[in-house]
Image (cartoon, coloured by chain):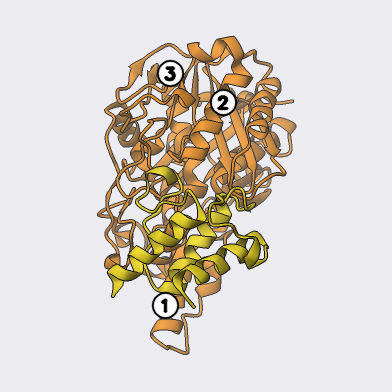
Chain colours: A orange, B yellow
Amino acid sequence: MNRVVITGAGTINALGGSVPETLQAMREGQLGIGPLQMRDLDRLSVKIGGQIKDFDPETHFDRQKLALYDRVTQLVLLASREAMAQSGLEITEELSETTGVVLGTAAGGMNTWDDNFRSVYEEGKNRVHPFVVPKLMTNAAASHLSMAYNIKGPSLTVSTACASSNHAIGLAFQMVRSGMARAMLAGGGDAMLTFGGVKAWEGLRVMSKTACRPFSANRSGMVQGEGAGVFVLETYEGAKARGAEILAELIGFSMTSDAGDIVMPNQQGAVRAIRGALRDACLDPQDIGYINAHGTGTAANDKTECAAVMEAFGAHAPALMMSSTKSMHGHLIGGTGAVELLACLMALRDGVIAPTIGYEQPDPNCALDVVPNVARQAKVTATLSNAFAFGGMNAVLALKAI
Amino acid sequence: MSVKDKVVQIIAEQGLLDVADVSLTATLEELGIDSLGVVESIFAIEEEFDIEVPFNANAPQESEFDISSVATIISAVETLVAEQT
């Protein structure tokens, strides 16, 4: 079994167009959520989101490429450029066949669906652009990533709603650990802030019209975000041999299914995922100093997640810190786990714990140290990142400082 | 059909019940309607009466729309329908 390390990280999300910008924003507890800018906004009842503003695709990609890139593909490619540049990994012909891509996305090319449905249904057009299918398919971003870096090994997209990125990173971790691949690009993205995407979430009645306030007694629901996060995973030996800087070691992964409800979370499913990740990582509960929570800010998630952490960590629960950065960048749906992993890297590398902002009132159902409103300095040697998706699919990653 | 009859019909359909078995004093939970069923019932009510029901599933008790029993739902819908006209 190989040890697996992260040597590159990249992102674009409402907090910033790079990892340093995003971490700086998390450190300062900045709010990336604001008024949505979107066509037909007056017909929406939810008008806020963690939207990436002032983004001009043409400054990053030529027009020919853009004809094939949905917004989610653009965001993933930008994140991967940063991750690859940091890692310095050169995908030689020799490495190419043992390198792969696993990305997570819930909605895939949502903007392309939205724009073209509008064109054929609302505007009555009878013809769409020839690239609609290759642009909207959920594996498009992973495919373009493989093409951009000449990656010829195992590549795929996983889709498990809000746990997609954690599943993607976990699978890539297992591939490198088992020796199936020597290096992997892993992460995910979603760009569901379209008129149809927001309408769909509105329908479920779990969205907040004001703010995402995870764990706060007055929380009023989730807020959608958008963006991507991509990481370079490789063997410890390989990274050492080429003198790469190691950001953290991935040491455990667990996935479980609730086999319960299609939307309501389940405490036991979450507990089993947390315990599974600890077991896989050969860690004891007291080794964990920080958990990046799923922390959606809904009544159902936050209560269930806190109960699960209490159960899984027992006497150690009051001593650990758990925050939800969704309060700052919103819920990136399938991309959320990738951006949230950055908070784990910051905790392990910089000793800075990202806060849960918007926190106003303690909730007895969420009686953990949720690092309210202000980031904290703390020495942490191991962290978990939780993702508990609709459909009852849970994925928890464990990381260690190196 | 009155507002009351229509609301009862929607709730009966959601709970897979006969209209006669929907007691006005019952809560939706007692009628076997879970949280997703509540959201679906509210959607059906909005479609039926062409109204906007103020309801957030995160804090049902704090929503302006009182769903504590069949009777309170009927009265809330009657108010919204009256405001509409």
Residue beneath disc 1 = A118
**Of callouts 3 and 1, which one flags the residue occurring earlier in the amino acid sequence?**
1
Say what amino acid the circle numbered 3 marks.
Asp
What's the residue at 60%, 14% (across, down)?
Answer: A314
Give the image quarter of residue A233. Answer: top right
Residue beneath disc 3 = A369
**Mark 2 falls within which chain?**
A
What's the residue at 55%, 69% (across, down)?
Answer: A134
**Of callouts 1 and 2, which one flags the residue occurring earlier in the amino acid sequence?**
1
Callout 2 secondary element: helix
Note whether B36 is above or below A303 in the view shown.
Answer: below
Does any portion of residue A19 appear in the rendered image? yes
Whether pointer 1 and pointer 2 mark residues with C-beta atoms closer than 8 Å, the reply is no
Say what amino acid the circle numbered 2 marks.
Ala
Give the image quarter of residue A179. Answer: top right
Residue beneath disc 2 = A307
Residue A398 shown left or right of residue B71 in the figure? right
**Of callouts 3 and 2, which one flags the residue occurring earlier in the amino acid sequence?**
2
Instruction: State the residue in front, A251 or A44.
Output: A44
Where's residue A140, x and y in %? 55, 61
Q: CA distance from mark 3 to mark 2?
A: 13 Å
**Foreground: disc 1 or disc 2:** 2
Say what amino acid the circle numbered 1 marks.
Arg
Callout 1 secondary element: helix
